[in-house]
């Protein structure tokens, strides 16, 4: 049972504040992913939890006890580094046994535990080898083995598969997930790769410039981004964001993107849900799959022209021009023959997001 | 698949091999000269042209280690027959080995000088490399106020030729009673080597990724344990290289040894040329002394050759 809590954590590097008043509660057995661009403070947060960085304010609690004054060695936390950091002068066996040798375990116990972890990770035949003789994937398995062997209170992982090639990354991602389900320890995982975050996390913590932006399940942050940063950071291809104005039109609402002459038709309920923001500066956010394209004219569809078509195998991403703005739509592959084709487009109101331009915050409209 | 090589590349390779051979010969010629002279009979040591083919003799080494004096008259056949083989080779050269009242062979000055060299060079190397490693680790891993200035100050101690401070050092040493002592030379050589050791080790320390120690810290070790269990083994290559350089500097140092020592703590470098004397120098004995003097550095470097070859730790950290 391990809970980790960050309360008002602050961290400065010189005059630069890299973590700004971070509050976060991580439950037992939870797999948390810290997601953000490089320099957003996610790695610093992880290192602060590990005890490799001091903090300038706030508390870090493990199982309710403040640990910010404890040394890394006394926090009973394991960490997997992006560089793996396997000790090159030791064999795989010695690497995995190294954390156990810091405890007062007998040789026989150590041997038994090393072999049991090696079996779990399927690296038994590598035990005698030196790290330099291992492939990237095996190095990573050994690094995870070294972290797991002590049965720590929590596992911290700093972009552990960032250095691997794409195919191996996918394999290792699945393996990490499988291990987490099997071992069930509280895990904090840092990455800048949103696909990794989406596929691994119980909850994703999105950070930007040292500030926590949103905490939620992968589905939550994808479907209900709290602000423009999250909206554009999570999801691939990126969400379309365009300034938009909302007006009342007959029995419905009309959402005009940029300087377009005609607006997209939305249910009238939008006006009331915008809570008086309708007249203000708004941004419309819509994921490519929320832009519906068809060849024939129909009610609520506006005539548009295709610009660029990106075939991505199972689907195409088609840029369509609405006024002077470009919206990206997701279509079946081969649906659009190429640039310059006249098609009709509509925005799915259920998938539309509205943001306040000034604050960037989501207005929480759900239609 | 074998790499395709053009004729110009082959020509370049051959020229390079010839150049390497020429350079090797230039470097090895003096060593051959010393080694061959050390095994020559005395009358062949200074012939013109030099004698290349000769029957090697061990007599220069016997003469190097034993105290000798000129024979006034040749030994009697009984004396000659009773003498062990090593004494006979000295008789053959017109000299005899000096014995004390009890008939014990008297040692020459060389063995004690050689021992002094070993004591001073090994101790000062251990001290300089040890302190240099700790200092370099500190500079490499922690934020030290005025780091650049301090490092420059450490290096600045090497910016003047050491010999310019020889006279003041001699006066100071005499005042505190450190002249002609092992401790005096050890302090001196440690001080000279320390700046070099700090700078060289700092370079090596900077190259050891700090993630290794961080991994050890998270694995439940203190920083000191992480230093000894992780950093030191990783720095072995650097420590070996630094130790070889420091040892060579201390081992070969001549000027200070000449000025600061006379008997008790005299090292081999000032002793060997002092044997040339004023009469007819025995070059074979001097060559034998020099030849033996070259061996420790050669052996030390040979033992550490694996560490001197870089690449031991490649591949374990992905950059």
Image (cartoon, coloured by chain):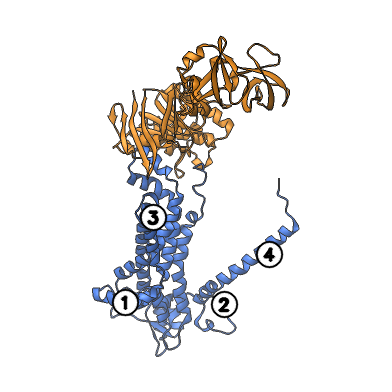
Chain colours: A orange, B blue
State the SS at label 3.
helix
Residue B247 or residue A293, whichever sits in front: A293
Q: Residue at x 51, y 46 (%)?
A: B314
State the SS at label 4.
helix
The residue to which callout 2 is attached is B54
Q: Residue at x 56, y 11 (%)?
A: A252
The residue to which callout 3 is attached is B136
Q: Residue at x 43, y 26 (%)?
A: A214
Residue A39 visible, this angle: yes
Which tag, 3 or 1, sits closer to the chain's start? 3
Residue A239 visible, this angle: no
Q: Is residue B10 left or right of residue A349?
A: right
Q: Are marks 4 and 1 on the same chain?
A: yes
Q: Is residue B72 left or right of residue B2?
A: left
Quarter of the image where one finds residue A247:
top right
State the SS at label 1.
helix
Residue A271 or residue B64, whichever sits in front: A271
Q: Pick out the residue farthest to the bottom.
A: B72
Residue A82 location in percent, x, y? Answer: 47, 37
The residue to which callout 1 is attached is B168
Q: Are marks 2 and 1 on the same chain?
A: yes
Which tag, 3 or 4, sits closer to the chain's start? 4
Dot 4 alpha-carbon crowd within 10 angstroms: few under 14, some 14 to 19, many 20 or more: few
Residue A243 location in percent, x, y? Answer: 55, 26
State the SS at label 2.
loop
State which chain disc 2 sits on.
B
C-alpha gap between disc 2 and disc 1? 49 Å
Which tag, 2 or 3, sits closer to the chain's start? 2
State which chain disc 4 sits on.
B
The residue to which callout 4 is attached is B15
Dot 1 alpha-carbon crowd within 10 angstroms: few under 14, some 14 to 19, many 20 or more: few
């Amino acid at each position: 049972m391990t809970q980790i809590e960050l309360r008002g954590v602050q961290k400065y590097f010189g005059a630069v504040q890299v973590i700004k008043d971070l509050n976060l509660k991580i439950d037992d057995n939870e797999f948390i992913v810290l997601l953000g661009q490089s320099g957003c403070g996610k790695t610093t947060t992880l290192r602060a939890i590990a005890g490799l960085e001091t903090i300038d304010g706030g508390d870090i609690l493990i199982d309710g006890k403040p640990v910010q004054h404890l040394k890394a060695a006394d926090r009973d936390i394991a960490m997997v580094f992006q560089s793996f950091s396997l000790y090159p002068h030791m064999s795989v066996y010695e690497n995995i046994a190294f954390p156990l040798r810091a405890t007062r375990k007998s040789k026989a116990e150590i041997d038994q535990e090393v072999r049991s972890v090696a079996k779990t990770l399927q690296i038994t035949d590598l035990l005698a080898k030196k790290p330099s003789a291992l492939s990237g994937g095996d190095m990573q398995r050994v690094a995870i083995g070294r972290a797991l062997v002590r049965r720590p209170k929590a596992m911290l992982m700093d972009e552990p598969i960032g250095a691997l090639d794409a195919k191996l990354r996918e394999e290792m991602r699945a393996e990490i997930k499988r291990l987490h389900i099997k071992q069930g320890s509280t895990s904090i995982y840092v990455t800048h790769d949103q696909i990794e975050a989406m596929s691994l996390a119980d909850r994703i913590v999105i950070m930007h410039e040292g500030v926590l932006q949103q905490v939620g399940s992968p589905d939550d942050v994808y479907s209900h981004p709290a602000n423009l940063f999250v909206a554009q950071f999570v999801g691939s291809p990126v969400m379309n964001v365009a300034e938009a104005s909302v007006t009342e039109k007959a029995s419905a609402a009309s959402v005009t993107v940029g300087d377009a002459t005609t607006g997209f038709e939305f249910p009238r309920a939008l006006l009331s849900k915008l809570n008086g923001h309708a007249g203000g500066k708004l941004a419309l956010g819509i994921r490519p799959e929320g832009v519906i394209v068809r060849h024939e004219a129909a009610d609520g569809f506006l005539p548009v022209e295709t610009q660029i078509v990106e075939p991505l195998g199972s689907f195409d991403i088609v840029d369509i021009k609405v006024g002077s703005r470009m919206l990206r739509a997701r279509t079946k592959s081969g649906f659009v023959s190429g640039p310059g084709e006249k098609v009709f487009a509509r925005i799915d109101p259920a998938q539309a997001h509205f943001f306040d331009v000034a604050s960037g915050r989501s207005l929480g409209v759900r239609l | 698949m074998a790499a395709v090589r053009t004729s110009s590349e082959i020509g370049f390779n051959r020229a390079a091999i010839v150049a390497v051979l020429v350079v090797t010969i230039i470097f090895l010629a003096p060593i051959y000269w010393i080694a061959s002279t050390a095994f020559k009979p005395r009358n062949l040591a200074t012939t013109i042209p030099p004698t290349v083919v000769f029957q090697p003799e061990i007599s220069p080494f016997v003469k190097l280690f034993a105290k000798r004096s000129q024979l006034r008259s040749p030994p009697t056949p009984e004396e000659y027959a009773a003498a062990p083989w090593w004494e006979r080779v000295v008789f053959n050269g017109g000299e005899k080995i000096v014995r004390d009242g009890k008939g014990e062979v008297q040692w020459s000055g060389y063995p004690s000088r050689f021992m002094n060299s070993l004591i001073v060079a090994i101790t000062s190397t251990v001290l300089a490399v040890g302190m240099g490693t700790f200092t370099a680790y500190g500079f490499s891993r922690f934020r030290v106020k005025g780091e650049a200035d301090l490092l420059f100050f450490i290096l600045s101690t090497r910016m003047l030729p050491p010999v310019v401070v020889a006279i003041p050092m001699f006066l100071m040493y005499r005042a505190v009673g450190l002249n002609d002592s092992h401790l005096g030379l050890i302090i001196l050589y440690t001080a000279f080597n320390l700046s070099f050791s700090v700078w060289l080790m700092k370079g090596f320390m900077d190259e050891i990724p700090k993630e290794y120690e961080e991994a050890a810290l998270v694995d439940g070790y203190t920083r000191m344990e992480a230093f000894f269990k992780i950093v030191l083994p990783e720095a072995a290559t650097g420590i070996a290289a630094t130790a070889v350089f420091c040892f060579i500097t201390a081992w070969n140092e001549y000027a200070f040894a000449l000025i600061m020592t006379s008997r008790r703590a005299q090292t081999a470098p000032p002793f060997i040329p002092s044997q040339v004397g004023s009469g007819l120098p025995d070059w074979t004995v001097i060559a034998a002394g020099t030849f033996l003097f070259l061996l420790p550095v050669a052996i030390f470097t040979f033992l550490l050759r694996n560490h001197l070859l870089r690449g031991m730790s490649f591949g374990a950290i992905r950059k």
